[in-house]
Structure formats: C-alpha cells, structure tokens
Amino acid sequence: MLKKLGTRRSAVLLASVLLMGSSLASIPTANAATIVIGSEGVIPPLDPHRMTGTPGLRVIDAIFDPLIREDLSKASDTAAALIGALAQSWSVSPDGLTYTLKLREGVTFHDGTPFNAEAVQVNFSRVMDKESPVFDSRASGNMTFLTRWIEKTSVVDPNTIEIVLKEPFSGFPRLLTDRRASIVSPAALEKHKGDELGFHPVGTGPFKLEVFQQNQQLNLARNDAYWGKKPGVEELIFRPVTDPTAMAIGMQTGQIDIIPSASSQQVAQLRVDPNVEVQYPEPANQYYMRLNTRAELTKNPVFRQALNYAVNRESIAALLDGQVTPAYGPVPLGNELPQSDATKPYSYDPEKAKELISSAGIATPATVKILAPNSGPGFGQTPQVIALLQQDLRAVGIDLQVQFLEFATLLTTEGPGYKDDVQGSFNGWVTGADSAYWLERMFSGSQQPPRGVNRGWYENSEVDQLFASARAETDEAKRDELYAQAAALIAKDAPWVFLYQDRLPRIVRKRVTGVVPARSVFFDYPSLGVR
C-alpha cells in the first residue's frame, strides 16, 4: 500500500503543477456553486458522433441527451435500467424489426432550435445518408456499432420517429443509450461542418458550453431551460490533469471535487482524507488473457480450462490492493445478465489444472507465448500481474513467455486476429460490457476479424445459434435465458483465461452530493449538488 505523500514531496509536486499549461492553481478552490471534475486526459473536440474515449464522453454526457438513458440515479446489481430521455417511450413491432419512439415535447436545444422528429432524422442522416448536406464520413465510421443494425429511419409525425432494423435485435434500445448516439442541434450541424462542430457543441443536456480552453479546461453553465430535473450547481469545470499524483494533490487542496476514474495509488493516497469518499461503482468490464483457439496447445478446450484453474485470481486482487474483483467466467458484474454458477465455473485449483493438462495429452513443461501492453489506461501494473500469472502457470508446468508492446502497437498487432505463432494476449474491455449483446461481440463466430473483435478465432455453432435466437427474442426474460445458456457454453469452452474486473473507483469530495455508485463510468448530472 502506498503511504500518503510527505509534505516536502507534495509541495514540490504542486509547485511543478503551477508551471503546467493546465495548472491547478490557475483557478481558485471551487466555490459553492461550482463542481470541478478532474479529467485524466485532455478534453477532445466535443462532437458526440466522432467521439472515442471516456474522458470526452463524460463531457458529452453533460451537454447532450440521447434518445434513451440508463437510470444512474440509483445503484443496482446488474446493468442500470433503461429510462426515457429525449424519447419518452418506445415500442417494438411483433416481428422485432420496427422501433417506434415517442419523443418528448417542448424541448429546445441550447441555441433555441426546437427538438422534434426532424431533428432526430437529421442526426441519423449525418451518419447514414451520404447524400445529406450534413453527412460526415468520420462520424459515420464511428457510429457503425449502431447503424449496422438500421435499415432506415423515418419521421412519422413531429413527435414520433420510426427506426426499421435489418434484422431483429432485442438489445437495440440499450445501444441508443451510448453517448455517441446523442442528438445534436440540426442548426449546429448545418453551420459547423467537419472539425468545427466539436468546438461548438449544441445539445439539449443539463449543461451548456461556456468556455472551452483546449488542452486546459472546459467550463459548462447550467441549462436553466433544461426539460428534466435541474442540476443543483450552476457550473461544471472539467480540468485535465494527466499526472495522477498532481490530481490527488488537487483533491487534497480543494481544487478538484471529483476524480471520476481513480487509480489504486490515488485511492491509497486519499482514502484516509476525512473530506473525501471513495466509491466503487464497479461498472461492467473484464480483464483477461484472450486465447488463440487456432494455435498449438490453446486450440484444445481442455487445456484452456486447465489454464483457468491454474490462476489464483485472489492473489491478483491482493496485488492490486483490492481495486479489482476476481472474474471466474465470461459475464462481468454489472452486465444485464445476473451471474450464476454455470457462467462462473472456475476456481483456483492447480491440482485439477495438472489433471486436465495430463488428460489433454500435453507433455510438460510446455510453452505458451502471449502479447501484453506495457502501458495504457488500466495497465499500469501489467508487469506485476504478468509475474503472478507466470508464477501460477509455472506451478502446473507451463512456461508463460510474454512480449510487451506499447498499447497502440498491441491493438494494431492483434486487431487482424492472432497469427498461429502466438497463443493470445493480456488485455481488457470496458465499452458496452453492460449489455448481454457484449457476449456476442466478444465470442460470436460472426465477429471474427475483419468483421469484429473476436481476435482469438473462437467459434461454437451452438453458441452462435443461441445468440441469434436471443437477438430475435422480444420477451426480455426469455432473451436473458438464451444469453445465459450461451454464456455457460462459453465458460466451458474457455476461450479466455478470465482474470478480473476493475472496480473503477471514483473519489468524491464530501461537499458534493448526488453521485450515486451506479454501475457505470458515468453519473447522473442533474442529481449533482453541493452541501
């Protein structure tokens, strides 16, 4: 565990921050009407349809509204329930192909443009219709996660939009909650083309742009005309501080109110501070060793099971100071699906691992080669995690050999799918992991490269049939049962070594109210207030 920084070192670090362009000292301690949110990265241009990365999407979430939202005003064991945002309600046709959304009336964008079905249609045209004057190719590419399902959209009346899918997909409403699917003012889309829109973001959200000092900070003012619950603060400030220790000092000195994505070092430094609270929202995500199901050794499902029994996940959790939760199967906590014994069958049992290796006809010692990131968000302690994995696997006769790569290089290398000379890679996934459909993205045979991210080439025709049936099932309970059956088969096939789930702690000053530890990397901005 890290000790609290000494006074002299803290002073030196804080002094260095004063010299940074994004200086913490450039703005005084937050006043009663303001909440300052620390951003672990520079705030990019605020175009939701082009946006990638959580730091930017957090800001998008305050300025814009999607058609449907998750209810982040309360905590839950599974993924947050869906509630209406710009769509008050929605329904699906019996064949599962047509979604009809009834839109909220009396809503205006920050620039005074009325919100209606035509505005929604313009937003879909921007990412789907190459003949539209507002079409943007970069935005279109970024939105294929949603638009790949859509055959067409049409205006039924001023307050009703209809979306026709190419095939039934029961998970479609949750896709509409993605912050990238936020609705932009059509007037802004017409006025600001290309890169310019990101510097003139106009939505319907609870806050609106006030000042955007790129690479420094961003100020948002409360939208007093907001259609929903009015936030209890007048201003939000997003302040980029890329040095984690400097961010923690900013919290200690009252210059930061919320660290939305805290590292284990920041938690260790700040949890003894009586003025702050550490929350563990535990949104759905998973870290794993994805295995190459075409390569020698790892093409054998019994050997893959053995690897899962060989790993002591509790040791990894202890190494990471309790900031992670062990994962024993493919369904992460916070997913729509509840966990069951069938979907998390593994435990630490090295003797069983040895038996399985022997029954698979594999002679030991045997060598497994994987790739791993040496940097990147969530991978700060990768070398230590890898060392534990090597220790555990060595105990059952497996030599784990690791090639460390820069994170971007790792993604480029594994993106086309693994070559036969590597047995997998250590990696993690957060985006979309709250959805049951996430299992299909990770494990469907149809999602192998170049069509998707099933980079280990896993395929099971029974699993794929269950996915297809679940996608078409409009009854939620029946759909979840089909996905659960698929998850149980995936767990048995063991295409990954399931390792752990980052608890993704956030740190909040106690003066701030309304930050609920719902299972999400986001929070409910209208609920924010100060004591």
Image (spheres, rainbow, N blue to C red):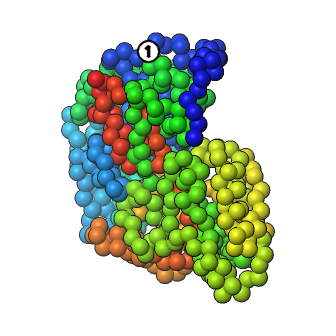
Can you say whether 20 is above or below 439 in the image? Answer: above
Report whether 100 appears left or right of 6: left
Residue position marked by numbered label 1 in the rendering: 29
Report whether 30 appears left or right of 192: left
Q: Secondary structure at mark 1?
A: loop
Q: Position of residue 333 (x, y in %)?
A: 42, 58
Q: Is residue 111 visible?
A: no
Can you say whether 510 is above or below 282 in the image? Answer: above
Quadrant of the rendering where the C terminus is positioned = top left
Given residues 152 and 176, the one toward you in this image is 176
Residue drawn at point x = 37 percent, y = 15 percent = 31
Quadrant of the rendering where the N terminus is positioned = top right
Check disc 1 and give the amino acid type.
Thr
Report whether 23 appears left or right of 465: right
Q: Quadrant of residue 174?
A: bottom left
Can you say whether 476 is above or below 228 in the image? Answer: below
